[in-house]
Image (cartoon, helix red, strand yellow):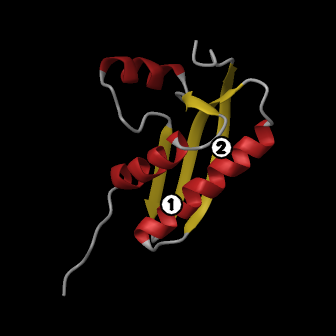
Amino acid sequence: MGEVEISKQAIATIAFQAVQRSYGVVGLASKNIADEVANAIVKDPTHGIDVDYKNNQINIDIYVIIEYGTRIKSVAASVANTVRYQVENSLGIPVNEINIHVQGLRISNGGD
C-alpha cells in the first residue's frame, strides 16, 4: 500500500498556525542568538518552533513572546493545549510533549 511520511516542517507549520491564534502570544522568538541571526538572513515561516519526530513520537518546543500583563502560566498552558489539539487533530498522531519557553514579554500597542 505504501507509506506516509510527515516532515518536521509540516508539523511545525501546523503548530505555528495554532500559536498565532493563541490569546496572549505577541510573537515567536529564537531560542538563541545563532537562530536569531539565521532567521534574519532566511525568513523561516516556522521560526520559534522546534519539532522532534522519531518513532511516532512528536515532541515540540515553542519559543514565545507573551503580552505583558497576561498570566504567563495560563497563556503557556493555553498555547500547549491549542497546539496539541491542532497537531493531533490534523495528523492523527498523539503528541508526546510540548514545551513552552517564554523568551520575553512585550507591551502591545493596543491598535494605535
Circle 1 residues within 10 Å: few <14, some 14–19, many ≥20:
some
The residue at 37%/17% (across/down) is 40
Q: Verify CB contact (< 8 Å) between mark 2 and mark 1.
A: no
Name which quarter of the figure residue 105 lies in: top right
Residue 10 picture location, percent across and down = 34, 54
Q: Which residue is mark 2?
A: 100
Residue 82 picture location, percent across and down = 59, 55
Q: Earlier in the sequence, mark 2 or mark 1?
A: 1
Q: Is residue 55 above or below residue 31?
A: below
Q: Residue 105 versus residue 103: which sits nearer the camera?
A: 105
Regarding residue 57, the answer to whether it shows in the image is: no
Name which quarter of the figure residue 44 lies in: top left
Classify the position of the N terminus by image quarter. Answer: bottom left
The residue at 45%/46% (across/down) is 17
The residue at 45%/26% (across/down) is 35
Residue 95 picture location, percent across and down = 55, 65
* Disc 1, SS: helix
Residue furthest to the front in view is 112
Mark 2 or mark 1: which is in front? 1
Q: Which residue is mark 1?
A: 86
Classify the position of the C terminus by image quarter. Answer: top right
Amino acid carrying label 2: it is Ile
Amino acid carrying label 1: it is Gln
Q: Is residue 107 above or below residue 82?
A: above
